[in-house]
Image (tube, rainbow, N blue to C red):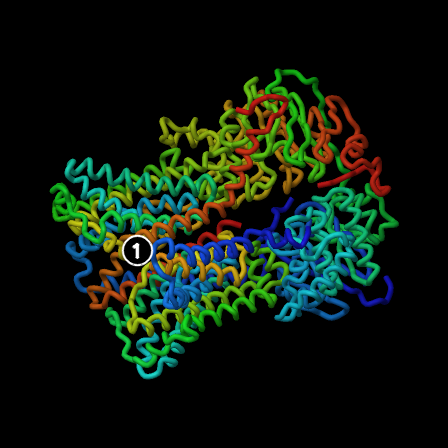
């Protein structure tokens, strides 16, 4: 018996062709960018490479955990910045207990705040984007109430460790790379990681197969929350103070790192290392533009275009595989 | 099904109940808090409604059709900056530049999403970031000031005590949206696209054209909101933050829009936006702090979005089943 | 053939997908007012031909003519423009709209401004023509049954002045009463001059309804006859190219202990008081048409129906049916009838799909062991007949039959599962794959499982089940641990002794 042919409407044929053209264009542009970067003066120097890693580290730490949320099928969390700030405030306030306890508190707080959101999303399939928008708004309001317009200052000196640069490289970079490896292992080599990928791939099938979707989603969000909390601690340490003014563009920077890494937003496919790559790629491009003398606005513009480009390429790749 | 049952759906009941509740609260609560309602209160409320209504349409209509447009935030910022830059001598020219420029970008985005069958969320996130960058570039990384005093004054001058040209423009566009949605084939088509895209396409709905049009309109509406707001405040900020989107989503959700698409109506969006605007003004009257306001709106959004959850009904059915007896055997 | 200009004329249509020639030189001619049946096995090319006529696919070669005029059909809207209406099994109706809005949806010459009164009147007329007079046009579609929705789609086609109406497996999911109503509507439509192309594998219905039948096999037309000259057996021969040989069905005494004891299982209005003792080592087949409740019984036992009530005991312990996680944990495996949407993880590798029920066994303290997982996956692949070389590929790339094997294979050789529930074991699977899956299920029973499957295909029931249970309208009609004839089964399911005067063959895949 011949194989059952796949339905391909003419409209989709055109879509397929259009996407392929874009893919080729995208790859060509990517190559051009790399050449452009390499040819820039001072780009390929140790100092510059370190600077790239360094500027990627804060957002990178948070984006690594955020990847779990995308992989489990909950798209993105728009509450990254508020959670980070609350954890920063908690970290600085808890420094009186010592650096390690303060870090633990920050990460635990992030994990718990996120887990609550994950529980609702996992158990009831609440719309993740809107829920995290609302939760973020709520947390931000709460944070404002807590710090009352003033800046929360460190209650101890431990934060200096986070700002130090052993071997000339900031601690945050070590943490980012280490966390990436650790999270990648969790994703690929643990039962939880496998379950996260399965739920993200097909939630209905996961339910029919008896996977505990509520628990898995909560765990994914908790992991994300822990890394956001850790990032928040660094945020507070860098600024030697925390308030909601630190939020800035954190949320979308983290999301951009995940998207540029090439993880599909629908979930079920991707990796933590990709996000690391995405964060570094964004930092690298901003760096090149900076070296070439372009202003902040251009860097942001480029970042946005890069996100769109990779998103389109990712969907081209996917559409060729799933029927 | 009787005629009365038809109207008892959440998408119709929620916006009416929400608006009525907020209206009652608006009329009663200030008195309870020892404050007075005056003509200025209504004026302020509608002033708040002016940009909010437009952004609610910009976010809500695509939501009904199953698309999520984050880029309205960027369009709003860019619209403000374009209007200030181009409207130095003629306010009208500034607005036209903003609407046309952003409309064009929205069209490009819409065509890409429609033709290439892309997921709207990640694409609009990327567009939003790019737009912020573009705004920054055009404004040379400065908050711009708007020198055209006559335009600034004109947009906010009181009309019929409670309104201003800004709020009237918003009301007008809402009316257009309501007519287009309710009295033309566009309403059912958008709902079909949001409910079951494939079914709509097979039935003959020109899905691609509608998607492209939707993103064009959302961009234009957001740009208009940004342009008029920057005239009003005589400046253009580079990054309005997430707040406009959050409030617009809250308004859409209160307006009966289901987040899974396929439910809602333009008049619901109007009522939802009015409700949120009234609430904002109410909180201002009773001097609720900014942070508390955020907490209230955040909780409200959380509550409504949870109630809209697809699997909630499953959980509740299961819980209800527990209490049904079967042969006297208790279920574990 | 008379000298009348054919309403629909396909001339030498060919289409290939990559290396596969789906349709070869197909020529087909239908007259105005004719009801033509189109039959053929899965993969014969019927769907491709339909998709070409409906404007979803462009043919590589050949010409389509409507009323003698050559046409190019590049989209559903093009097809609509030429008077072609296509009603797919997957209906193109929208739940959140009213009946009238659905009937009016997407019409190409609809005006911009709606005239609701005119819409309602027109819809009322159309509903009357298809037998749905009792429904109000303003009613939400979500309240209608599957059969009624079919009729709404036909009403929509009528409203667009369709000259060619294509119905793709319209009755597969309908009850008898609904089938009669659909037939009546079709006959009325044909009498008004519309040509109907009725695609179905239910030969009794085809012979009862159609004026002529066209048979396809391997992408070509192999037969084309007026119904008066045909019998069911001749049709089957034409479709298969040979006489249908039924696999011998085995019956065995119910030995083994009772593993799953069900008393008074009810699910809303879908299932009413289902009771049975299921023993290990045995294969049970529950037969019923769609809506009879067979699938719902399985889903309830799998914990997927939150409103299920009843006394169910697994190994003597009461089973909580309200959550699939608990049910699975206690040892019940479930294979859905919709493998793409609810069964497989299409983007994930075949190996991961196979091991999903055994994550505990291939890991130590939460950490996956690559070696254990590979061994497990290879073992399951071998058992299920899936090529081990494809374990790393996304399962979405496999053919339908292999996908189904991978899905069933998930629950093989697992000591953790003592009951295996399978809804429509061989849906969308060709004859070769079907035999493999039946063998897998038999082997699973031999290994000690209680295998319970639901099917609407009587041949499958006879081939595979050791004990047959028939259901209709949510209730058990008959339980047959011994030999049973097809006639008895058919009469249980349909409440008719012989349908439409056709032969005893109810359905052929």
Nearer-the-camera pick, A205 or A317 = A205
Q: Nearer the viewer, residue B232 or A49?
A: B232
Most foreground residue, C66 or A61: A61
Measuring from the top left, give residue A80's x and y in whole percent. 32, 49
Question: Which element is circle 1 on?
Answer: helix
**Residue at image location 53% in from the left, 37% down from the top:** B316
Locate the C terminus of chain C by quadrant: top right
> Relative to A100, is C21 above or below?
below
At x 29%, y 52%, the residue is A279
User: As drawn, which residue projects farthest toward the bottom?
Assistant: B89
Q: Position of residue A121 (x, y in %)?
A: 43, 43
Provide the chain ID for the residue under circle 1.
B
Q: Position of residue A15 (x, y in %)?
A: 51, 61
Residue at point 23%, 67% (across, down):
A295
Q: Quadrant of the N terminus of chain C?
A: bottom right
Give me the residue at 65% from left, 52% from top. Answer: C141
Q: Is residue C505 above or below residue B245?
A: above
Q: Can see residue C393?
A: no
Residue B116 in the image: state x and y as whole percent: 48, 61
Instruction: Note whether residue C498 is visible.
Output: yes
Residue A122 appears left or right of C451: left
Would you call the spot at circle 1 few (<14 residues within 10 Å), some (14-19), or many (20 or more)? some
Give the left or right position of residue B4, taking residue C418 as reference. Answer: right
Q: Return the residue nearer the eye: C69 or B181.
A: B181
In the image, is A71 to the left or to the right of A91?
right
Residue identifier under label 1: B290
């Amino acid at each position: 018996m011949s194989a059952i042919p796949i339905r391909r409407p003419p409209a989709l044929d055109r879509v397929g062709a259009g996407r392929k053209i874009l893919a080729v264009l995208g790859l060509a542009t990517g190559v051009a960018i790399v050449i452009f970067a390499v040819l820039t003066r001072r780009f390929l120097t140790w100092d510059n490479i370190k600077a790239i890693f360094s500027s990627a580290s804060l957002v990178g730490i948070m984006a690594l955990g955020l990847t779990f949320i995308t992989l489990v099928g909950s798209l993105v969390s728009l509450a990254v910045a508020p959670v980070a700030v609350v954890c920063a405030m908690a970290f600085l306030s808890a420094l009186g207990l010592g650096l390690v306890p303060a870090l633990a508190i920050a990460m635990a707080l992030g994990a718990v705040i996120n887990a609550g959101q994950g529980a609702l999303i996992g158990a009831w399939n609440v719309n993740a984007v809107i829920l995290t928008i609302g939760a973020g708004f709520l947390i931000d309001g709460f944070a404002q109430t807590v710090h009352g317009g003033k800046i929360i200052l460190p209650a101890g000196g431990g934060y200096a460790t986070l700002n130090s640069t052993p071997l000339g490289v900031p601690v945050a970079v070590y943490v980012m790379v280490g966390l990436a490896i650790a999270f990648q292992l969790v994703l690929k080599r643990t039962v939880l990681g496998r379950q996260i990928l399965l739920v993200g791939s097909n939630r209905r099938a996961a339910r029919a197969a008896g996977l505990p979707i509520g628990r898995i989603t909560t765990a994914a969000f908790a992991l994300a929350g822990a890394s956001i909390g850790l990032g928040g601690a660094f945020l507070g340490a860098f600024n030697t103070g925390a308030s909601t003014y630190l939020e800035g563009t954190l949320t979308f920077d983290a999301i951009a790192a995940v998207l540029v890494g090439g993880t599909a937003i629908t979930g079920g496919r991707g990796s933590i290392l990709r996000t690391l790559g995405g964060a570094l790629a964004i930092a690298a491009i901003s760096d090149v533009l900076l070296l070439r003398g372009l202003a902040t606005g251009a860097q942001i513009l480029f970042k946005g275009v890069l996100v769109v480009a990779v998103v389109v390429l990712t969907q081209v790749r996917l559409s060729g595989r799933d029927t | 099904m009787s005629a009365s049952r038809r109207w008892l759906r959440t998408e119709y009941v929620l916006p009416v109940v929400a608006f009525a509740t907020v209206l009652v609260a608006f009329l009663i609560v200030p008195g309870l808090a020892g404050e007075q309602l005056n003509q200025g209160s209504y004026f302020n409320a509608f002033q708040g409604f002016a940009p909010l209504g437009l952004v609610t349409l910009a976010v809500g209509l695509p939501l009904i059709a199953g698309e999520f447009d984050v880029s309205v935030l960027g369009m709003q910022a860019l619209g403000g900056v374009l209007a200030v830059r181009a409207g130095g001598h003629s306010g009208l020219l500034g607005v036209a530049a903003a609407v046309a420029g952003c409309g064009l970008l929205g069209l490009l985005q819409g065509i890409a999403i429609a033709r290439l069958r892309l997921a709207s969320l990640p694409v609009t996130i990327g567009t939003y970031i790019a737009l912020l960058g573009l705004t920054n570039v055009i404004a040379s990384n400065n908050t711009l000031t708007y020198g055209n005093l006559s335009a600034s004054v004109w947009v906010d001058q009181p009309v019929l005590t409670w309104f201003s040209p800004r709020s009237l423009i918003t009301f007008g566009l809402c009316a257009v949206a309501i007519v287009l949605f309710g009295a033309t084939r566009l309403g059912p088509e958008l709902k079909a696209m949001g409910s079951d895209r494939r079914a709509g396409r097979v039935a003959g709905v020109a899905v691609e054209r509608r998607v492209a049009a939707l993103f064009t309109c959302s961009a234009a509406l957001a740009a208009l909101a940004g342009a008029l707001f920057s005239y009003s405040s005589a400046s253009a900020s580079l990054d309005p933050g997430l707040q406009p989107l959050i409030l617009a989503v809250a308004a859409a959700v209160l307006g009966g829009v289901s987040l899974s698409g396929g439910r809602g109506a333009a008049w619901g969006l109007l009522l939802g936006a009015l409700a949120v605007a009234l609430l904002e003004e109410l909180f201002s009257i009773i001097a609720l702090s900014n942070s508390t306001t955020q907490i209230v709106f955040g909780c409200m959004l959380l509550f409504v979005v949870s109630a809209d959850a697809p699997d909630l009904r499953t959980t509740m059915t299961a819980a209800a089943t527990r209490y049904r007896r079967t042969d006297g055997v208790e279920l574990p | 053939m008379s000298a009348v200009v054919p309403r629909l004329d396909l001339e030498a249509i060919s289409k290939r997908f990559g290396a596969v020639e789906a349709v070869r030189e197909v020529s087909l001619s239908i007259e105005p007012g004719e009801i033509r049946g189109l039959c053929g096995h899965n993969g014969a090319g019927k769907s491709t031909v339909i998709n070409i006529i409906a404007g979803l696919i462009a043919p590589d070669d050949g010409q389509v003519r409507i009323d003698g005029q050559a046409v190019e059909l590049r989209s559903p809207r093009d097809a609509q423009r030429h008077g072609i209406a296509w009603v797919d099994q997957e209906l193109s109706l929208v739940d959140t709209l009213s009946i009238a809005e659905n009937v009016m949806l997407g019409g190409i010459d609809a005006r911009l401004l709606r005239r609701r009164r005119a819409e309602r009147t027109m819809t009322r007329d159309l509903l009357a023509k298809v037998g749905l007079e009792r429904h109000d046009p303003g009613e939400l579609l979500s309240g209608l049954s599957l059969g009624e929705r079919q009729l709404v789609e036909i009403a929509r086609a009528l409203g667009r002045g369709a000259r060619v109406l294509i119905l793709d497996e319209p009755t597969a999911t309908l009850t008898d009463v609904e089938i009669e109503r659909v037939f009546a509507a079709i006959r009325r439509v044909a009498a008004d001059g519309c040509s109907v192309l009725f695609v179905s594998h239910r030969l009794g219905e085809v012979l009862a309804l159609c004026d002529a039948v066209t048979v396809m096999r391997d992408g070509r037309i192999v037969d084309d006859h007026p119904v008066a000259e045909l019998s069911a057996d001749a049709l089957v021969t034409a479709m298969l190219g040979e006489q249908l040989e039924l696999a011998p069905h085995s019956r065995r005494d119910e030995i083994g202990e009772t593993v799953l004891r069900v008393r008074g299982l009810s699910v809303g209005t879908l299932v009413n008081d289902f009771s049975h003792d299921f023993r290990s080592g045995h294969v049970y087949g529950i037969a019923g048409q769609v809506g009879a409740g067979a699938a719902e019984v399985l889903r309830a036992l799998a914990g997927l129906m939150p409103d299920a009530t009843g006394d169910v005991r697994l190994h003597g312990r009461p089973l909580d049916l309200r959550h699939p996680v608990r049910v699975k944990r206690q040892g019940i495996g479930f294979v859905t009838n919709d493998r793409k949407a609810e069964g497989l993880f299409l983007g994930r590798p075949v190996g991961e799909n196979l091991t999903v029920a055994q994550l505990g066994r291939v890991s130590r303290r939460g950490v996956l062991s690559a070696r254990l997982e590979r061994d497990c996956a290879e073992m399951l692949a071998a058992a299920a007949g899936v090529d081990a070389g494809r374990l790393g590929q996304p399962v979405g790339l496999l053919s339908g039959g292999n996908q189904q094997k991978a899905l069933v294979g998930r629950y093989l050789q697992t000591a953790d599962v003592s009951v295996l529930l399978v809804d429509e074991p061989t849906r969308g699977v060709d004859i070769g794959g079907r035999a493999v899956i039946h063998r897998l299920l038999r082997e699973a029973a031999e290994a000690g499982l209680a295998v319970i499957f639901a099917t609407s295909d009587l041949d499958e029931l006879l081939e595979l089940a050791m004990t047959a249970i028939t259901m209709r309208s949510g209730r058990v009609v008959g339980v047959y641990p011994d030999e049973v004839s097809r006639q008895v089964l058919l009469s249980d399911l349909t409440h008719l002794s012989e349908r439409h005067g056709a032969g005893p063959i109810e359905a052929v895949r």
